[in-house]
Amino acid sequence: MAEVSMCSSGSSTEPTPEEERVLIRDIALAAESNGKEGDTFYLITQRWWQHWIEYVNQDQPNNPNDASSVSEHCDSVGSSTLKKPAGIDNSDLISEAAPEESTTGTEIHDTLLEGRDYVLLPQEVWNQLHTWYGGGPTLARKVISSGISQTELAVEVYPLRLQLIMMPKGDCSTIRISKKETIGDLHRRACQIFDLNVEQVFIWDFYGRRKHGLMIDMDRTLDDANIQMDQDILVEVLNNVDNTVSGGLSASKGSSRSYSTDLPQSQTPARESDNTYGVSGVSTRGSSGGLTGLLNLGNTCFMNSAIQCLVHTPEFAKYFREDYHQEINWKNPLGMVGELALAFGELLRKLWAPGRMPVAPRPFKAKLARFAPQFSGYNQHDSQELLAFLLDGLHEDLNRVKDKPYVKSRDADGRPDEEVADEYWANHIARNDSIIVDVCQGQYKSTLVCPVCNKVSVTFDPFMYLSLPLQSTITRTMTVTVFACDGNALPTAFTVTVPKQGRCRDLIQALSNACSLKPSEKLLLVEVHHNTVQRFLEDPLVSLSTIKDDDHLAAYRIPKLLKNTKYLQFILRRREQGASSNQTASGWKSFGAPLVSAISCDDVITRGDVQAMVRRMLSPFQRTQSPGSADVSDSSISAAASEHCNDSGSGKACPGSNNMENNDVDSTKATTFEELQLQLVDESNVCIDLVDGEHKSIKISSSSTSTIVYIDWSQKLLESYDTHCIENLSEVFKYGHVAKKARNEPLSLYTCLEAFLREEPLVPEDMWFCPQCKERRQASKKLDLWRLPEVLVIHLKRFSYSRSMKHKLETFVNFPIHDFDLTNYIANKNNSQRQLYELYALTNHYGGMGSGHYTAHIKLLDENRWYNFDDSHISQINEEDVKSAAAYVLFYRRVRTEDASVSNGVPSSAGVDNIHLQK
């Protein structure tokens, strides 16, 4: 796209705010659709960006959409007249505290938050803004693959900061390097910095100032090598005399050694003492335990909120403040050699110590990153994903079963549920037994039914938390405009409900039912953009997640029996003076939605055939009277025509278009159609006039799905047709109306639970192998709660994922604080105990995925008061303020009734292998 240069003040070619907005939006949309690993993004201060957004949107009407991306920001709400921003000034992002020996270049503050302090711009957007405004400094960052599967793309805002320590001299240097760089890259950087020969140098993983391993796999990435932010790297120089590295170890040995290396006294890192966690001017209520905040180390609010909820779980608070070391399983291959449990226990004790300043959880974060590299660095993460890892990791570190026996669970085979459930539970606790499972472990019943042989399979599996779908995450509302290609009806917009993770075949089926599709017809689904077909959605397996809410879809009713089908795409054009962006050289500009007609390549299509198609498709749009001859509005004419056509139930042409005053209508069409200019675009991109020579055949493109035909309208002809319904194609989803409805009709937590427990067929990608049929079947699956834990953790599934995009649902869920009664949801009818729970903690998520923020609401049971934990800041809140649309993970405690004796009839003493229950 051509750039608009920044011109001197007063120049007539200087772009207007609207021109800047549109150009940046278009550049951003193009960049977002083509994002890949290795792309460059640029940090720009939020303060300057917000000024620019307000400047370019000052003349825009209100837009209800949540501007969560660069392109959406360009359509944000405007304000009153504003001055043009000065040059870009990123100085407030820059840290001046870089050490003297640093070679990292321009350093940014460690605690910046995306959306609060800065915005990430694609390279093309930054280049254009910098061309217009200048300034800086330039802060470029690369896109890397991230996540457990390495399939998600993320901008590495904070590359690894490593301290290189050269021995035996003791020289130090701090560098920045991407975690996707290799050990070989790090080796070369070290040699360059200290002016050493490559053959002289060996580098060690020196995490915690202890040698953990000689780094000799030069092709391995630093991420794979588990190198952490702010850790040390030991650079040892080869001793020329005895061919050993300094310290007396042979270079080929010692990779498994772990010992403290002698360092000059001045280089030994000072350990953070108990009183070094504070920040000047920030304090918490220190008179009672449990009201200590956690410092945000840089996008660590996701971790802080989850930790505070676990720390304030009474059973965990009691357990970790006592001597739990004897229960640590030092040899569990599934655990972290007790290190995660020790780090969590130490942090919990600090948080419960009275009269303390906020704690910096650096040691815990370092352990976490070492055993779960997906949480390393300073990017924002999902608080629930961290919570799942912590519960699993703490369980394995504290599993009282040192040698797990092999057990094989049997299918129910008609036995009583109680007998099968107890058998599964006994097998489960034989391998798993920890405080985590004592508190958080539950059991559910899973029933699968084969649709062919009706084989029923019943199993009883453990869960650590329930992931409940919100109503809107199960289904999705989509609006599509349906066109009749035979001229029998005006286009009609249909709103249907389809599975959220469904495919195009689900949408087509729903539309077919809604529009009463005839047996001889099928629907052609397309995406319309800029008055033309952007893509033909003919593949029924295309995921609906690829269709955005602000897209425009159309569906065309075409004959089902056509073979070797191609499509004629009729694009409407009219003359419009002063237009420049979409205008062709001939002065015609496209408008409205395209019309589509299906043809068979086996048939000979003449120019006269095309003219007849156009007459037929445009017939519903023709006004019965000229605009000035009667006092009838366009909308009433359209409504009457639509109603008349909808009354025709047969497969024949609508009476309104062919039989009503047939001679007069045909004669009118004959005279008006002559003014329609038809231009077919051939394979050489040459326009061919179709008005003359009716019997001449046309050539259909063999390489393209469709052939374009322009319909050029004169102003006089436009007055004879009502094209309003094709000029305003509905969006797939309108935010404003649904958001208002959601506020008026809050979703109940009970409704979410019922949706989770509802019987439904397995998705095709997760077919079940039926032991009776000996084949994979799309069985129906039903979940039931069997026994519930002391602490019930409920995850509200607010986030959905598609490709590299993440979307958040802002639905308000009305969850009970007191008397959360699950008695009627327990399938174990032999348990007469009431299942009552009370809320004591929850995490909240505010904002979008990229720029969101986590907090926690926690009730101190001793005080019977609620507090808001916002990183290091803690404040008391009222109980009515606990509920909000930001609620994400809920923590409930069992309420002991008078007749309660045991949990669900079976003492709670078990562990877990597979703790994640999601649906």
Image: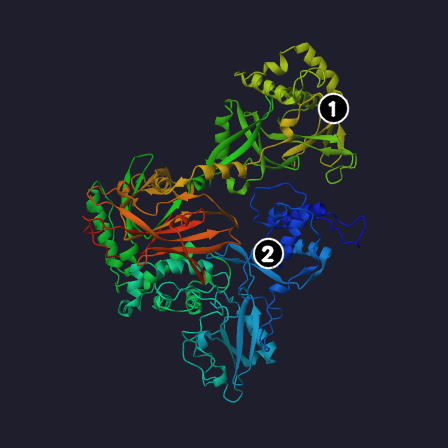
Amino acid type for the residue under numbered disc 2 = Val
Label 2 crowd (10 A; few <14 / some 14-19 / many >=20): many
Q: Quadrant of residue 822?
A: top left
Q: Is residue 911 visible?
A: no
Check the image and report above or below for 673 versus 36.
Answer: above
Q: Secondary structure at mark 2?
A: strand
Image location (x, y in percent) of residue 4: 75, 50
According to the picture, the residue beneath numbered tag 2 turns out to be: 119
Which residue is rendered at x = 53% and y = 75% of the image?
A: 163
Does residue 618 sit above or below 282 in this rendering? above
Q: Position of residue 465 (x, y in %)?
A: 34, 51
The residue at 50%/82% (across/down) is 267
Judging by the rendered image, the residue that carries numbered circle 1 is: 676
Please tell me which of labels 1 and 2 falls first in the chain. Answer: 2
Which three-letter amino acid code belongs to the residue tagged 1? Leu
Judge left or right: residue 342 versus residue 597. Answer: left
Numbered disc total = 2
Q: Quadrant of residue 524?
A: top right
For the view shown, which residue lies furthest in the right direction? 11
Location of residue 748 in the rendering, given as x and y in whole percent from the top left corner = 38, 41
Say whether residue 9 is left or right of residue 865: right
Is label 1 or label 2 in front? 2
**Observer-nearest of 379 and 889:** 889
- What label does residue 284 carry, if any? none
Screen quadrant of the C terminus:
top left
Nearer to us in this view, 611 or 738: 738
Q: CA distance from mark 1 to mark 2?
A: 50 Å
Residue at the farthest bottom position: 241
